[in-house]
Amino acid sequence: YDMPKLDGLDFLERVREKDDVPFILFTGKGSEEIASEAISRGVTDYLQKQTDTSQYSLLANRIINSVEKYRASKQLERSQEKFSKLVTNSSDVLGIVDENARFKYISPVCEDVLGYEQHELIGSVAFSLMPPEDRERAMNEFFAAVEDSDTEPVIEHGWEKKNGEVIPVETRGTNMFDDEFINGFVVNGRDISEIKERQERIEQQNERLTEMHNALSHDIQSPLQVALNSLFLYREEEDRTYLNKIEHALERIDVLVEQILTMTEHETTPKDTEQIALQDISERVWKMIETEEGTLEIDGNREFKADQSRLQQVLQNLFKNAIQHAEGEVTISVGTIEDGIYVEDTGPGIPKSERDEVFESGYTTKKNNTGLGLNIVKQIIDGHGWNIKLEEGSSGGARFEITGITFEPQVHN
């Protein structure tokens, strides 16, 4: 306790200013007052000197115990810090709810995932974040797991963010009411939006593969058989009319192959978007069609961003569709609406009962058509994040409206 320039309590205070290492005050001048002050200043242990040598064994034990406790405490702090960092930096939302499904704890990442701060959700019912159609199923799973601790439910459901957006989530639950530290039901919610998007893309690719298979196995097989039979008959009879049939069959196969290739993801998914002027691209596509059976009218030249080659494919298919279904001359109009563009024709139109089917692969009212053109249009429009619908035009023809387009601001001189 007594030292030349300071006493044991002063030394303790200086040590505590720098570190929390174990500190044992071992003194022969002890008193209740010194012991009390030492404790208040953060001494680890206090031991008064004795006259016999057993005091050293006692001191040794005190040192060993103090060091072991200190090391265990530091290990616990490191574990807690590690756990805290894992919870804080995890992209999953971790929570603990009571038997009524009210949040006792929720990890800070809830602000990034859901837009809520922790204090806004503590005490709220977890099911209140779910859309109504998911609540009953989730509640049944939860209360069953509360009753049976061996049940660990895994469910997919929606979570409504603070801004109203609903995201798909996979939640895993574990009953830990018997754990004295947790005393609750642990939930681990993971945003699976990207997984769902990948699944949707795979399903779309599978649908395209099915459509391609059907086109290859049915649509191409028929003209191919015509060509082979005509070739056989030509060799037998040397009648040149069979050559015309072969030519027509090969032309049809060529069209089918071109459209099947366009159906692949590489051809329908937008890659490089650029500034597009409606009038410019419409005129360019019209020149490519080379028809004398129609007239093109353009109303407006607003600009927007799109994949030029894909948009050309859309307009080309819509223009050709109008020409092929018209009986004689047809006028095709292209223009803008509030949030998109339209393509309208003066042809016979499409019955209301069939308008929901026109974008399906294989739909056609013409014997020699492939039924792939409008399906390709739909795929490209979806790829841009736009929407397309079919209405009746002002003259009774077909009117295709493509919406969801963001136009560049118009500059007025």
Image (cartoon, grey):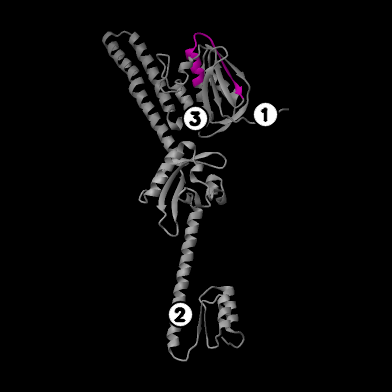
Residue 253: x and y, percent? 38, 20
Q: Which type of secondary structure does the marked residue at label 3 adopt?
A: helix
Question: Amino acid type of disc 2?
Answer: Arg
Q: Earlier in the sequence, mark 3 or mark 1?
A: 3
**Disc on the earlier residue, 2 or 1:** 2
Question: Which SS class for mark 1?
Answer: loop
Residue underneath mark 2? 62
| Disc ID at residue 382 | 3
- Specify whether residue 188 is in view: yes
In the image, what residue occupies the spot 56% across and 83% down? 32
The residue nearer to you, when weighing 92 against 292, is 92
Which residues fall within the magenta stretch? 317-337
Pointers 3 and 1 in contact (C-beta within 8 Å): no
Residue 343 lies within the magenta run: no
Q: Are marks 2 and 1 in contact (CB under 8 Å)?
A: no
| Most foreground residue, 149 or 5 | 149
- Judge whether residue 330 is colored magenta: yes
Q: Nearer the viewer, mark 3 or mark 2?
A: 2
Mark 1 sits on what residue? 410
User: Residue 58, labelled with which disc?
Assistant: none
Task: State which quadrant residue 142 falls in.
Answer: top left
Using the image, determine if residue 224 lies above or below residue 140: above
Q: Amino acid at mark 3?
A: Asp
Q: Nearer the viewer, residue 298 or 143?
A: 143
Q: Position of residue 320 (x, y in %)?
A: 49, 17
